[in-house]
Amino acid sequence: MSMKKRYCLIMTTFMLFLVARSQLTTDFYKTTCPNLLSVVRKQMINAIKTEMRMAASLLRLHFHDCFVKGCDASILLDGTDGEKFALPNQNSVRGYEVVDQIKSSVESSCSGVVSCADILAIAARDAVLLSGGPSWKVLLGRRDALSPANNSTVNGALPGPTEALDSIISKFAAVGLNLTDVVSLSGGHTIGLARCVTFSNRLFDSAGTAAADSTMNASMASDLQSFCPVNGDGNRTTALDRNSTDLFDSHYFQNLLNGKGLLSSDQILVSGNVDAVTTTKSLVQSYSNNFSLFSADFANSMIKMGNFNPLTGSSGEIRKSCRVVNSS
């Protein structure tokens, strides 16, 4: 792509972001659903009390929704050929039942008013806050998609755990996010779990012989080779942030500096061999000992991501059930 075309694409994305931001407001439901935030918060507290991992799951659900055609709750739609069952989401994205519970409670308070897309955005913010992380004012007014994206669109939009840094950066740029956003949002891996299949490439060679990634801490690699053996259960899970599983903190970045990033896409922020690593590693170093800076940048990045290409006005609909479009 020529520099001129690249510039035009970036400017178009930026202008879409500005238009979306102008249409979303923090008080969108002030009169139509004044208790919305407290209703969602109550359900989120209950969900996380039941399962701490759910905080990370709902944060990730919002991320996977926004990166594919914008934050429109299309990932929640049932159907075997939709986003929910695309390869990056199968046996991976979870928390749908909690979203159903939140939606039901919201509908009881104010029927037919609040979109599933807005519920996802609020739930993601509460997930971070209730895990010890920052809060931010969520801009609201999104509407719900009438159909999911197809599998190829999902596969092409979502950054993968084994992807090269320049490819990850390009996918972030496609949704209006920059290098700071890449690093700060990667910090969402300070909570949650990952399946063996997502990092086994760092433990064994193609023949199944133990051959750890040279950028991985040797002791950690040995532990994981035992935990995730060749021909073992690829869906077995372990902490993304080793020794700090459920607390939203800066420990994730400290791990990266010590070769203890779990996914290749995590460790590559400090160990990659492209020019951007100079910037990403500097940010990792800053965040590792400055939680306030990480919190501020993370909150800002979440706002930016949450405002990418939302449906507003008369576009889309307000679903009665987050799993299906409304009947005509």
Image (cartoon, rainbow, N blue to C red):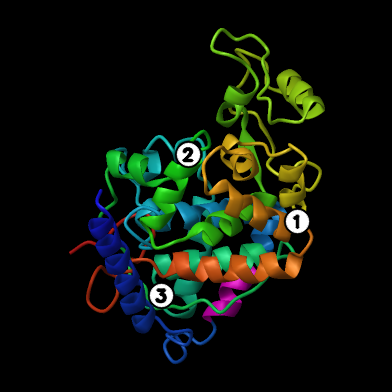
Question: Image quadrant for the C terminus?
Answer: bottom left
Magenta segment includes 217: no
Q: Main secondary structure of the magenta part?
A: helix
Q: Residues within 10 Å of mark 3 (few under 14, many from 20)?
A: many
Sequence-wise first label, 3 or 1: 3
Along the viewing direction, whichever of 44 and 250 lies nearer the viewer: 250
Cα–Cα span, label 3 and label 2: 31 Å
Q: Secondary structure at mark 2?
A: loop
Residue 15 location, quadrant: bottom left
Residue drawn 50% across the image and 53% down it: 61
Label 1: few (<14), some (14–19) or many (≥20) C-alpha neighbours in 10 Å: many
Above or below, 251 against 242 in this view is below
Q: Is residue 248 visible?
A: no
Question: Where does label 1 land, which residue?
Answer: 288
Q: Are marks 3 and 1 in contact (CB under 8 Å)?
A: no
Start-end of magenta stretch: 36-43
Q: Position of residue 72 (x, y in %)?
A: 35, 62
The residue that mark 2 highlights is 160
In the structure shown, which secondary structural element does the residue marked by tag 1 occupy?
A: helix
